[in-house]
């Protein structure tokens, strides 16, 4: 499985979202989102849960 930071970045680019827009959806700052995408830091459990719910929700909608 791909690293969470890469999955998050790919999701953002695929949806055409800016870092600011995705940071707002997740309730974090733009610098925090950037550090996650660059894999400089890992999100804490609460934020990891929000990210995974967002990513998994998209995967569910993509299934036939």
Image: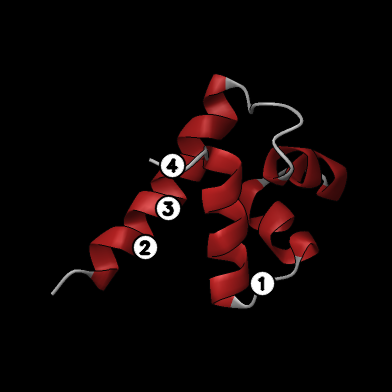
**Residue 13 falls in image quadrant:** bottom right
Q: Residue furthest front?
A: 1
Asked if the residue at tag 4 contacts the one at tag 2, i.e. Cβ–Cβ closer than 8 Å, the answer is no
For residue 27, above or below residue 12: above
Asked if the residue at tag 4 contacts the one at tag 1, i.e. Cβ–Cβ closer than 8 Å, the answer is no
Q: Residue furthest left?
A: 64
Q: Could you tell which of marks 1 and 4 lies nearer the N-terminus?
A: 1
For residue 60, above or below residue 26: below
Give the CA separation, mark 3 to mark 2.
5 Å
Question: In percent of the image, x 31 and y 60: which residue is there?
Answer: 59
Asked if the residue at tag 4 contacts the one at tag 3, i.e. Cβ–Cβ closer than 8 Å, the answer is yes
Q: Could you tell which of marks 1 and 3 lies nearer the N-terminus?
A: 1
50, 31: nearer the viewer: 31
SS at badge 1: loop
> Percent from the top left, x then y, of residue 63?
19, 69
Give the CA separation, mark 1 to mark 3.
14 Å
Label number found at residue 58: 2
Give the CA separation, mark 2 to mark 1.
14 Å
Q: Is residue 4 left or right of residue 36?
A: left
SS at badge 2: helix
Pick the quarter of the image with the C terminus.
Answer: bottom left
Asked if the residue at tag 2 contacts the one at tag 3, i.e. Cβ–Cβ closer than 8 Å, the answer is yes
Residue tagged 4: 52
Label number found at residue 64: none
Residue tagged 3: 55
Asked if the residue at tag 3 contacts the one at tag 1, i.e. Cβ–Cβ closer than 8 Å, the answer is no
Question: In percent of the image, x 58 and y 49: which residue is there?
Answer: 6
Residue tagged 1: 17
Q: Could you tell which of marks 2 and 4 lies nearer the N-terminus?
A: 4
Pick the quarter of the image with the N terminus.
Answer: top left
> Percent from the top left, x then y, of residue 28?
74, 42
SS at badge 4: helix
């Amino acid at each position: 499985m791909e690293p969470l930071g890469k999955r998050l970045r790919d999701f953002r680019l695929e949806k055409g979202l800016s870092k600011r827009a995705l940071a707002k959806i997740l309730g974090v700052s733009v610098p925090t989102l950037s550090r996650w995408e660059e894999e400089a830091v890992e999100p804490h459990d609460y934020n990891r849960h929000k990210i995974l719910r967002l990513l998994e929700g998209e995967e569910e909608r993509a299934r036939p």
